Amino acid sequence: MSSAGVEPAASQAAIESAAQALMSGQLVAFPTETVYGLGADADNAQAVAQIYATKGRPSNHPVIVHLATPDDMQAWAKHLDQQAWQLAQAFWPGPLTLIVSSDAQTGTMITGGQTTVGLRCPSHPVARALLAEFARLKRQAGAVRAGVAAPSANRFGRISPTNADHVRQEFTEAIAAGLLVLQGGASEVGIESTIVDLSGLALGLPVTLLRPGAITASQIEAVLGQPVLAPTSESPRVSGSLKAHYAPTTPFGLVDGKDLDATVTQWLRQHPGCLAVMALRQAPRALDNRVQWFCMADDPSLYARDLYARLREMDDLGVAAIICQHPPQGLAWDGVVDRLTRAAAAFEGSSR
Ligand code: TXA
Ligand code: MG
């Protein structure tokens, strides 16, 4: 296996074979600018069922449909408000998923049995080439629409993959059985797309943010000229909002920057093992040799880009715990703070 980020992006020939594989009902793992996805023809119920089986994911969780162009939205939505077009124009192709009312033809495995569907046009060149070639083949076969259903390419509950090696670590058996993995280097955004729910607009309900990401609520508000609210208990299910979602397997705790040194010292006093620290500053000069110190970027985009690769790296060290310095306040950090808070919530109550 080559090291992350240096492997060449998939060739046109590899992309064409992958589009053919999707046509014949097989799964394909592919890069996007957010995280890698595990894709299937969204109009092939058996292929979509394979995604759930491969991930070990509960079958009532909806999946995002990836589209080649914004115009393709029409074929998947029952009704599109002008706000959907405004957001698509402003942010697609890119790391934004729109939840809209679903067309009646869309399978319940895509919608999770709800009346909505999640749509996204990714910007990664390999994803775009795959989606375009798949759409061409579907049209040639007489289909009226083409979409690739794809959750993140990780086993359920695990950290999302941000390079092809991560995907290979997740699905060793499926890959041995023929699962194709398209390469595309390290995902630039590094955390999953922002999800914004527009499905209530027709009923006069507000726009809600279901999952924060690189595109912030205030950027969306600026385009729409209306507020974007936090989700309520009536909002549709998002598996990423489950408590234990984005978690490493190593106990993970979040602490304020001012408490970091004291927490590390106390942990070392109380525990015999080794510790990883994810901080926003360099390691102190006299660092205990049981501590592995990771200095994260003091910039939300760079932090997000490296986050999942770092968490995997720390998980693989076999340390007894990870202590993470809480990032600064501010809207631009919302996506990162959301993932870190969920990771920590998975270990609430356990000793660090
Ligand atoms: O960046 C991303 O969004 C990546 C890449 C591969 O595109 N995909 C991704 O998929 O993160 P997944 O399945 O791991 O997370 C998508 C989230 C899930 O939590 C799912 O519940 C939610 O989107 N979702 C999908 N369709 C929905 C719908 N109709 N209503 C509400 N939530 C939906
Ligand atoms: Mg996921």
Image (cartoon, rainbow, N blue to C red):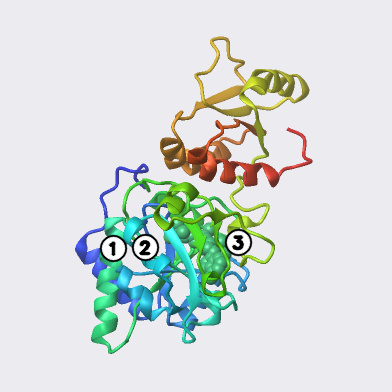
Q: Is mark 2 within 8 Å of ligand 1?
A: no
Q: Residues within 10 Å of mark 3 (few under 14, many from 20)?
A: some
| Residue 249 visible from this viewpoint | no
Secondary element at image label 2: helix
Which residue sits furthest left?
Answer: 12
Label 1, label 2: how many angstroms apart (C-alpha)?
A: 21 Å
Q: Can you give x and y, in whole percent of width and height, for residue 303 in the image?
A: 46, 36
Residue position marked by numbered label 2 in the rendering: 86
Q: Earlier in the sequence, mark 3 or mark 2?
A: 2
Q: Amino acid at mark 2?
A: Gln
Badge 3 amino acid: Ser
In percent of width and height, residue 143 lies at 32, 87
Depth check: give the residue in front, 266 or 175. 266
* Occupied quadrant, residue 59: bottom right
Q: Is mark 3 within 8 Å of ligand 1?
A: yes
> Is residue 342 in view?
yes
Q: Say whether residue 318 is left or right of residue 269.
A: left
